[in-house]
């Protein structure tokens, strides 16, 4: 391209532009199939209206008009199939990337051991996304801090790391989840703050759909939803609370909701979800996300402990629509 002007966003294709329209080569209207290699000719011994023999358009002399319900249904079906094929090819995710390219987002990681998990987690973010990584190493547990230094040196433009001597509270140290997460939140300057656990890996770009959901008006979007009353999974769509393995949140609202006094990660995430105003959502399409080992989840209680007596905050006055 020689034109330096910013490209305009294309409107979605109309149904008749996708499939089944005149000139596609398909005999949906009962006439001659005109397409590649046919030049409008009807082969010898061709039946006048083969669709009629299958009961689609009446007797051989009754050709469907373009405005019949049958033709409309066929085109709608074809359009849906075409859209699904485009989604499989990644067109939807690419469109979301374009729509969110001006929105800044950072992945925040607490590094508290399990160096192999950390390496797999960070490398998956670097490989599949464009987000920057902010990582806080707590005491170089098991050499995880050394792995973080290596990764940060290799990807200087993507990873920013801090190292402190305090070790995690779960290992007898003084660093709690709430205060450590609060430090990362203050160090972040992005519009969207993404909380991610180091035992989570991406098999593709799982961040763009979350960022797109936030850009569309949600306060936060996550990999999985949960009902805080009974701990049962919820989603996709709007959910009462999010689990904390992977969650994108508007940074301005995260400041108000993050419980700095929290010690336990799962209770903290639940408290944070219930404090956030507005909508919490799980994307409609499954995200390419996996947990390395479900037994490594900090050896804590159930992922979504039942909570009672805690209402959701009212929507903030400056919430984007």
Image (cartoon, helix red, strand yellow):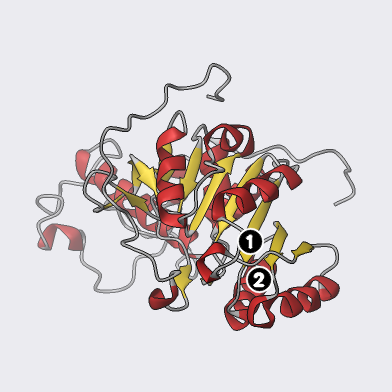
Q: Residues within 10 Å of mark 2 (few under 14, many from 20)?
A: many
Q: Is residue 103 visible?
A: yes
Q: How many numbered marks does the figure carry?
A: 2
Of the image marks 2 and 1, the number of the one nearer the N terminus: 1
Whether residue 52 is situated above or below residue 278 in the rendered picture: below
Q: Residue 118: where, in percent of width, then height? A: 62, 75
Q: Residue at x 11, y 62 (%)?
A: 53
| Residue most extreme to the top | 317
Tag 2 and tag 1, C-beta contact below 8 Å? yes
Q: Which residue in the structure is indicated by mark 1? A: 109
Residue 290 lies, in percent from the top left, at 45, 71
Q: Residues within 10 Å of mark 1 (few under 14, many from 20)?
A: many
Badge 2 marks a residue whose secondary structure is helix
Picture residue at 72% right of the left edge, 74% below the top: 145
Answer left or right for 282 relative to 140. left
Q: Is residue 254 left or right of residue 314?
A: right
Task: Give residue 27's quadrant in the image.
Answer: bottom left
* 212 left or right, relative to 184: left
Residue at image point 26% right, 52% down = 231
Q: Which mark is residue 229?
A: none
| Nearer to the camera, 287 or 257 | 257
The secondary element bearing badge 1 is classed as: strand
Name the residue tied to disc 2: 122
Nearer the observer, 16 or 181 = 181
Q: Nearer the viewer, residue 317 or 228?
A: 228
x then y, percent, for residue 133: 71, 60
Coordinates of residue 97 in the picture (x, y in percent): 64, 50
């Amino acid at each position: 391209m020689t034109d330096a002007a910013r490209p305009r966003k294309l409107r979605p294709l109309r149904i008749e532009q996708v499939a089944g329209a005149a000139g596609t080569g398909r005999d949906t209207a009962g006439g001659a199939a005109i397409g590649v290699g046919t030049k409008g000719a009807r082969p010898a011994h061709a039946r006048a209206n083969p669709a009629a023999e299958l009961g689609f358009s009446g007797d051989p002399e009754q050709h469907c008009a373009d405005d019949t319900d049958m033709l409309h249904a066929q085109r709608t079906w074809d359009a849906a199939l075409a859209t699904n094929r485009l989604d499989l090819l990644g067109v939807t995710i690419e469109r979301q990337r374009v729509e969110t390219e001006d929105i800044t987002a950072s992945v925040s990681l607490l590094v508290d051991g399990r160096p192999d998990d950390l390496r797999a987690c960070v490398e998956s973010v670097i490989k599949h996304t464009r987000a920057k990584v902010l990582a806080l190493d707590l005491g170089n547990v098991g050499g995880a801090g050394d792995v973080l230094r290596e990764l940060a040196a290799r990807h200087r433009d993507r990873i920013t790391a801090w190292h402190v001597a305090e070790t995690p509270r779960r290992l007898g140290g003084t660093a709690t989840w709430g205060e450590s997460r609060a430090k990362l939140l203050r160090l972040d300057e992005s519009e969207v703050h993404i909380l991610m656990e180091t035992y989570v890996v991406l098999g593709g770009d799982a961040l763009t759909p979350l960022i797109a959901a936030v850009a569309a008006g949600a306060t936060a979007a996550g990999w999985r939803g949960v009902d805080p009353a009974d701990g049962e999974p919820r989603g996709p769509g709007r959910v009462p609370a999010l689990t904390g393995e992977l969650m994108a949140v508007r940074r301005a609202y995260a400041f108000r909701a993050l419980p700095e006094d929290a010690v336990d990660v799962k209770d903290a995430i639940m408290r944070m979800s219930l404090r956030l105003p507005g909508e919490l959502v799980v994307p409609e399409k499954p995200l390419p996300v996996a947990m390395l080992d479900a037994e490594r989840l900090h050896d804590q209680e159930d992922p979504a402990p039942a909570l009672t007596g805690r209402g959701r905050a009212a929507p903030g006055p400056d919430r984007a629509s």
